[in-house]
Amino acid sequence: MDEIRGRLPEGWRARLREEIEDRDKRADAVIEVSAPDGESSLLLVGVKRSVEPRDVPELARRLRELGAELEPPPDATMLAAQYLNSSARKRIVEEGLNYADATGNLHLSLEEPALFIRDTGASRDPWRGPGRPRDSFRGPIAARVVRALVDFAPPMTVPTLIERSEVSTGAGYRMIDFLERQDLVERQPRGPITRADWRGVLESWARDYELNLAETADTFLAPRGLLSLWERLSGVEESCYVLSGSAAAAYYEEYAQARMAMLYADEPQRFAERLDLRPVESGANVLLVRPADRVVYARAQERHGIRIAAPSQVAVDLLNGPGRAPVEAQALLDWMERNEPAWRR
């Protein structure tokens, strides 16, 4: 109630109309939201301690069934919880429901009287303590599992995925459990993974990614332009680097001419000297990133003598990139959907 009242426009009111005593019906309250002219809407609220994305369709169905039994019927429904992660919030809106949590994440949409409020609170669960299940895609372990899950098509056993990810057994199972709760993978009981929403996995990973596989990132200028840089890269025989970002995406699905080259390299400064790059603070056309984990090199491909990151890595880097990069990411993801056999093993 405090979160809703604190965000209503001037002259609007919200009051708790009634609490529903039958807890088996899985709804907890009816809130009346009133406009300055007196017109009002009834909001049926179901409260859960936590909400997983995979649970949303069933929770929505139960709330709608309960709403049909109430008199007068509610005009809208809402799911509320202590904390709702971004995947759960997205799924709730897709089901046509509103949401609210105790950190300030709020989505309230009413038709009559017309009202739309959306606000953001915490991006991570502030109550998550040690020993609780994984609740994000952050860190190298998540990156390794996601990359393997996306790069290899199911069916696939969890031990096989763990082996391909090169993570510990416990960490691998915790990550798969997290992905199941996000409704991004399905697996048979004690059996193999049978479905992986690889595009949803990449987009969800990108929201937590924020280049978190980077130890350092420095900007440079290739004075003779990127064409000269490609020539120099084609002469590098070691596997100490990989090209990502817009320039790498062009090898799969060219959206527009690349103006910036993003390179992961084990030793960026030495690599810059080898490529005759000059460190600059402005006007850069090369970004050199020292990776915090070697997963960025996994399943790289060679094109015209240049090591190109796998599409899954390129996509997440673009989704987190500046300017037009997210649009290029969507173009690459569309290409990946159309040409899955060409890149997925």
Image: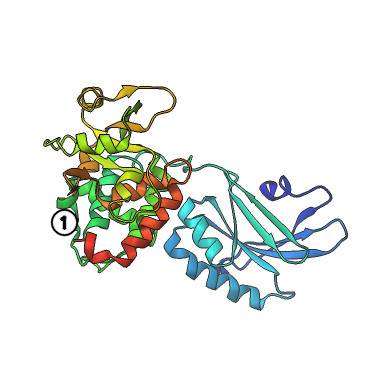
Q: What element carries label 1?
A: helix
In the picture, the quarter occupied by the C terminus is bottom left
- Going by the numbered disc 1, the residue's amino acid type is Pro
Please state the horizontal and vertical placement of residue 26, each as a whole percent of the image. 56, 66
Please state the horizontal and vertical placement of residue 64, each as a whole percent of the image. 59, 73
Question: With 33 as the anchor, is 126 left or right in this view?
Answer: left
Question: With 88 as the anchor, is 297 left or right in this view?
Answer: left
Residue drawn at the location 54% of the way across and 69% of the way down: 60
Question: Compared to 241, does 95 lie above or below?
Answer: below
Task: Check disc 1 and report the residue beneath it.
Answer: 159
Please state the horizontal and vertical placement of residue 72, each as a whole percent of the image. 74, 74
Q: Using the rendered view, name the quadrant where residue 74 is placed.
A: bottom right
Q: Looking at the image, which is closer to me, 273 or 169?
A: 273
Q: Looking at the image, which is closer to me, 170 or 314?
A: 314
Question: Compared to 23, does 166 lie above or below?
Answer: above
Q: Looking at the image, which is closer to me, 251 or 7?
A: 251
Q: Residue furthest left?
A: 237
Badge 1: residue crowd in 10 Å (few <14, some 14–19, many ≥20)? some
Please state the horizontal and vertical placement of residue 281, each as a whole percent of the image. 42, 22
Q: Using the rendered view, name the quadrant where residue 32 is placed.
A: bottom right
- Residue 192 visible (yes or no): yes
Q: Using the rendered view, name the quadrant where residue 317 is placed.
A: top left
Specify how the rendered protein is coloured: rainbow
Residue drawn at the location 51% of the way across and 58% of the way down: 90
Q: Looking at the image, which is closer to me, 234 or 343?
A: 234
Residue drawn at the location 70% of the way across and 69% of the way down: 75
